[in-house]
Amino acid sequence: MNKRVITVGIICIVLISLTVFQLMKNKNKIAKEIYIHDTSTPILVEDGRAEVHTFDSQFSFLGTFEPNRTNLIGSEGQGKIISLNVQEGQLINQGAILLQLDNEMLQYQLENLDVSIESQSNDLERLTVLSKSEAVPAVQLEKAKLALKSSQIQRKQVLKQLSGNVLKAPFSGVITKKLVDLGSVVGIGTPVFEITDISQLKLTVSVPERDIQNFVLNQQVSVNVDVFPGKSFSGKVSLIGIQADKMHNFKVQVLVANAKKELRSGMFATTSLLSSNSVTVLSVPRKALVGSTKNPAVFLIKNGKATLTYFTAGTSDGDYIEVINGLTKDDRIILKGQVNLTAGSPVKTLK
């Protein structure tokens, strides 16, 4: 019996050992098949330097489109949502019904008030007749009138609550956020939707003080969008800042009609206007730009590594962006390959 037990134990140990060995073999095989990027391997990039560039008499200022308006819509009533008529991304028109709340109890209140008003109206008629013959005191008639008026006011309040239980779109736009679901219980003022109006878009640009005098309110300007090369849109200057930032730039906003909804918030665009003067300033190639135009940056090469550096941009044309502050002519700027970079990535340049 003991020999048999020992034999079975040995067999179990052998089987377990073989299983472990096979699992380790499979693990090593899978590990070899999985590609793991070696962060110490330099990434091949193309570099250049900031250079002096002349912007001709047609100046362009780079910016990013923003919605004409974005509003967070709150519930006007309180209760459980029994009907939800829109979804995120849906285009809706002004006055469209967005949701409806349960109004059963309010309907009961309204019916009760209607019965009460009818009864009080009848009582008032009888008291009026009796008052003329001085069969009832005048004060009783006055109380009846006040009671009827109070019930009528209560009815108006219930009707207002009922109208608030049906939420309608205050303006046309796109549902960009849906914050509730069918069956949710909301109170007055609870945020339920975010509606974004893109029938017009605002292009916000920063204009150096030397060029701000070229802009006037309601001025018609040309707007070009990166994703629609060769196509121009008409814009109108809607705002000119009166206070410069610390870099002596002024905010200018241009309204662009978007009836076909082909333009989208966040797209890069430039607004152009003619000037009698040309400007020769330090600039960087536009293709080196990283991030948004509100906070433009480029990757520099320092000690063999990519360093993300922010700068203040000014005038722009199709190929170059003016550098107002943040870069020098001696900086080595990465022109190609930055899509694969993160701050601190090792890099090597094309010979």
Image (cartoon, helix red, strand yellow):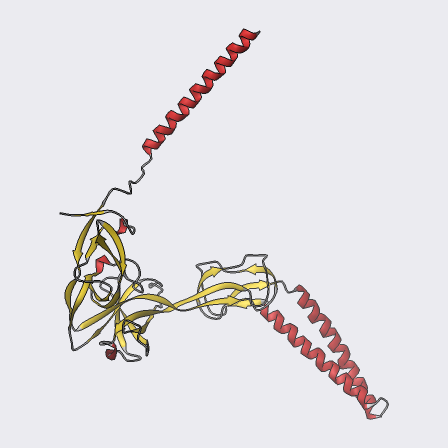
**Observer-nearest of 114 and 6:** 6
Q: How many marks?
A: 0
Q: Please provide percent x and percent y for residue 257.
A: 34, 70
Residue 319 can be seen in this image: no
Q: Splitting the image into 4 quarters, where does residue 154 fall?
A: bottom right
Q: Please provide percent x and percent y for residue 101.
A: 60, 63
**Outermost residue toward the left?**
351
**Observer-nearest of 110 and 190:** 190
Residue 256 can be seen in this image: yes
Q: Is the residue 238 above or below the residue 331 in the image?
A: below
Q: Please provide percent x and percent y for residue 251.
A: 31, 73
Residue at 51% x, 10% y is 7
**Outermost residue toward the front?**
303
* Residue 121 left/right relative to 248: right
Q: Where's the N terminus, which quadrant?
A: top right
**Observer-nearest of 319 and 169:** 319
* Residue 47 left/right relative to 77: left
* Residue 189 left/right relative to 340: right
Q: Please provide percent x and percent y for residue 142.
A: 77, 87
